[in-house]
Image (cartoon, rainbow, N blue to C red):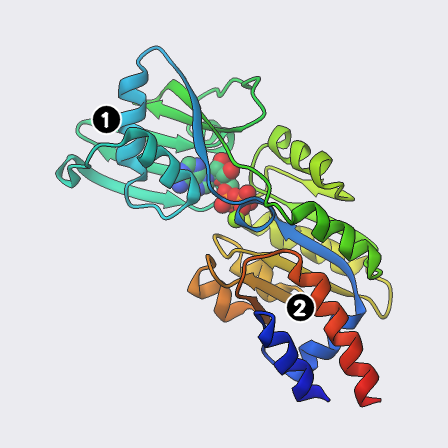
Amino acid sequence: GLFAGIGGASRKGILVKGGNYLEALKDIDTVVFDKTGTLTKGVFRVQKIIAENQEQVLELAAYGESFSSHPIARSILEAYGKPIDKNRIIECEELSGHGIRAMIDQHEVLLGNALLMNAHDITAEEIPSAGTAVYVGIDGKLAGCIVIADEVKESSAEAIAALRQVGVKRTVMLSGDRMAAVEAVKDQLKLDEVYGELLPQNKVEKVEELLASLPDTGKLAFVGDGINDAPVIARADIGFAMGGIGSDAAIEAADVVLMKDDPLAISEAIVISRKTKAILW
Ligand code: ADP
Ligand code: MG
């Protein structure tokens, strides 16, 4: 029974790391998702560059992002489209949930969200577009903003509806992205609750709050792609990692690994868990 359940799940690309997790899946009350790469494709495209000197802003941004594996970085490097001369990068540091700080030629470059700009006393004006805003600070001043956009995965809306159908009470999304981008995804997917502008440690705190408000027998699942969210995956009752695009740290921290990166697999896993229980007891 139990082994058939794990085997059945693995044939669907759902790798459950133990019988206890397979059993716990049937009691999921709350499913918390990461946004980027989990409910959205994580494939960003540069929509526009708001700057006086667009060329300089894009070039320094591309140089700053050239060591990053974040989906935002890929989109900026693609828009730049030229080779990177690594000798020009004197220093470069990725600040989880914020962005990048780098020294390129003689310029101090900051790339990332409003939080990062504020931390360096740069005022980041709210931009009207719904996309993700990557602010570019050069030598202590705001030089521009690169607006990039991602899209929801084809199966995400169906995945949320399917969770409701199998009895999940609360669907939640956490993101480090700004609220305008987060609210747009909430409306498209009909999620119950969304929280934006969260740092990785704020995501852990939010999951702890949600864990505290679970009903007695209910379990909380977190689903992430692992870029910055391995600690949250570890903290949830059941941590799911997108295995295809997920980082090694996330796959390590996870209780269930989804080989197809498809959010529909969460409700499928719950159904398999219930069937397995029916066979066993
Ligand atoms: P999410 O919570 O949506 O998965 P992350 O936690 O990976 O997003 O990142 C949160 C925010 O931090 C991003 O929306 C972006 O504003 C900023 N950020 C993170 N990494 C980078 C980067 N390499 N370049 C620019 N901005 C970044
Ligand atoms: Mg993420």
Nearer the observer, 69 or 214: 69
Q: Toward the viewer: 121 or 24?
A: 24
Q: Amino acid at mark 2?
A: Ile
Instruction: Where is residue 178? Give x, y as percent.
Output: 58, 32
Percent position (x, y) of residue 249? 45, 64
Q: Quadrant of residue 2?
A: bottom right
Q: Secondary structure at mark 2?
A: strand
Q: Which residue is label 2 attached to? A: 238
Q: Bin the neighbour count of mark 1 within 10 Å (Cα to Cα): few under 14, some 14-19, many 20 and up.
A: some
Residue located 47% across and 53% down the image = 227
Q: Earlier in the sequence, mark 2 or mark 1?
A: 1
Q: Position of residue 222 (x, y in %)?
A: 65, 59
| The disc label shown at residue 99, or none | none
Quick check: 67 left or right of 269? left
Whether 221 is drawn above or below 53: the answer is: below
Count of numbered circles in the view: 2
Q: Which mark is residue 107?
A: 1
Q: Amino acid at mark 1?
A: His
Q: Nearer the viewer, mark 2 or mark 1?
A: 2
Given residues 252 and 4, the one toward you in this image is 4
Neighbour tally class for label 2: few under 14, some 14-19, many 20 plus, Cα within 10 Å: many
Contact between marks 2 and 1 (CB within 8 A): the answer is: no
Residue drawn 43% across the image and 43% down it: 71
Q: CA distance from mark 2 to mark 1?
A: 45 Å
Q: Is residue 99 visible?
A: no
